[in-house]
Image (cartoon, rainbow, N blue to C red):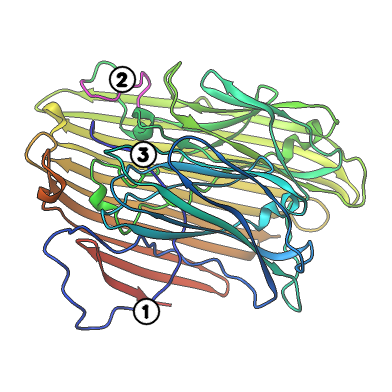
Amino acid sequence: MRALCAGAAALALGAGPALAAGSPEPPAEFGTDWHDPVTAAPPVSVPDTTSCTVTLADTEFRDYTPYKSTYTPPKGCGTRWNKVVLRLDGSVAGRQYDRLGYLRVGGVEVLRTSTPEPSPDGIAWKVEKDVTRYAATLRSPQPVEMLIGNLVNETYTGVIKVKATLTFYTAEGRARPAAVPDRVLTLDGAHEAGTAYEGTVITPRNSERIVAEVYATGSGGGCEEFWYLTVPDAAPYSCKAADGPYREVRVAVDGRLAGIAAPHPTIWTGGWSNPFLWYVIPAPRAFDVRPLEYDLTPFAGLLNDGRPHRITVSVAGVPAGQSGWSTPTNILVWQDAKASRVTGALTGHTESTPENSTAYTPGATHRFTAEGGHSLTVSGYLDTSHGRVATTVRRTVAASSAHHWTGGEATDGLRARWTDDETVTVRGRGPATTTRTQRAYTLDGEITGATGPRLRTVLTTGDRAESVTLRGGVRTGWSRLDDTYTGDAAYNRNVPRDQRHATGVSRERYRLTGPGLCHDRTIATAQGTLTEDRNRC
């Protein structure tokens, strides 16, 4: 897929009604303008309480110069909130690639995003994200840094305009203060170390829960943007990796493996050689790069000694010396309010041998298959003000893929699946609490005509997760997510923009259910127009 290109952004707002019968028929092909980007994901739910809004950034991006300012907490909304919502409003017109970006407050990564590709007439998009978990950082003035790296010249004319705000909702009546981490830490001296990213952290000595979150993205326009397509040197394909496509994002504490996770196969809005797939509906997570989370509580007994400890984030499978992954990391800490010091120990650490097998079959259609997996179990205890608490984290990741392509990569297809299963068990006073989460990501797509006059891409992606919490064997909570996208788009290659005669249809169904929660929305497009918007809940 040599023509694949980069980009991404976050949750677009809105949950409109189904379109009325008799709506105008979509055009026969794409014109110079199309519907603004939208997703089927739900907006952030907020309480009906007093709110205050603060602007973090209001700027334009024309190059790779970060925007910097100072955040000041809102007046009139207190310091303990029920909800904090980040909103980004963007616009761009002309011609431009999709561009990656970030927003940091006090060094804390609060948003990793990218942009949609514009129409000549211009588009606008909106993104919102629940950032209540960063409340501890937002209670005091902080430096702000934002960057959406861009290039503007006589060819790429799109200037990216953005405004980012935070809205704080007070805790009034039934809207109680949200249970949030007491501290949000960043890595001191964070730097690239070969293919890893590392720095040090000093956690409070009374930490009783520690979670690392890693905003992992394969990007930069090179092959690591399409890591799931890489093949060993023996196979004649344009993207190489000695160990094939298996990738795994690992976190280590003082050199010892502490957590593993499967990366999400995010597709930016120029991906799979075909921006016409994504002009209105982006792929799952393309507008909101959600962080991978690692429960490091079993290591809290080691981390609570008041000394700096080395945190290393690495991506297994990346060829030595090759760049392309970004892994900014936040450390979330919950403290024991009734103890100045919490002690403990790591009591168990069991790791399987990582598996990674590949097979290549040459022919008129080249075929390459890959299977990989890894598991890790860590246990530890803490002596808290409310007794001894033991935590065990078990995680298993796996991946399988079947990749086929013809000479010159004229036809190029992939069917792949990744799973990431995690169980966290906490034992202390009373019945044990166990939370099981099963995540699954899928890609099934094919490009045809990549060396001919007309290129076509057909693609289906899936982002699914199920979680259940048991206390003493009794279910106390659960949730289920299923976000599925399908698209089919084609255009004439190597011709001026007005001669592409592009067509494209896309559809997304986003289902999220849980106790007292039901969201089931489907949206569909044809040639850049919205043809369906249906809610089933």
Amino acid bearing label 1: Pro
Q: Which mark is residue 152?
A: 3
Q: From this view, report whether residue 23 is shown above or below residue 460.
A: below
Residue 193 coordinates in the image, percent (x, y): 58, 19
Q: Which type of secondary structure does the marked residue at label 1 adopt?
A: loop
Residue extending farthest front = 154
Instruction: Please say if the residues under marks 2 and 1 sit with CB atoms less than 8 Å apart.
Output: no
Q: CA distance from mark 3 to mark 1?
A: 38 Å
Q: Which type of secondary structure does the marked residue at label 3 adopt?
A: loop
Viewer-nearest of discs 2 and 3:
3
Q: Which mark is residue 17?
A: 1
Q: Which type of secondary structure does the marked residue at label 2 adopt?
A: loop
Quarter residue 229 falls in: top left
Pick the front one: 100 or 120: 120
Horizontal side, residue 394 vs residue 223: left or right: right
| Residue 102 drawn in magenta | no
Q: Which mark is residue 85?
A: none
Q: Earlier in the sequence, mark 2 or mark 3?
A: 3
Instruction: Please say if the residues under marks 3 and 1 sit with CB atoms less than 8 Å apart.
Output: no
Q: Is residue 369 visible?
A: yes
Residue 437 coordinates in the image, percent (x, y): 55, 52
Q: Residue at x 23, y 34 (%)?
A: 3
Residue extending farthest left = 453
Q: Residues within 10 Å of mark 3 (few under 14, many from 20)?
A: some
Amino acid bearing label 2: Pro
Q: Residue at x 79, y 36 (%)?
A: 203
Q: Which residue is mark 2?
A: 232
Q: Residue at x 38, y 30 (%)?
A: 224
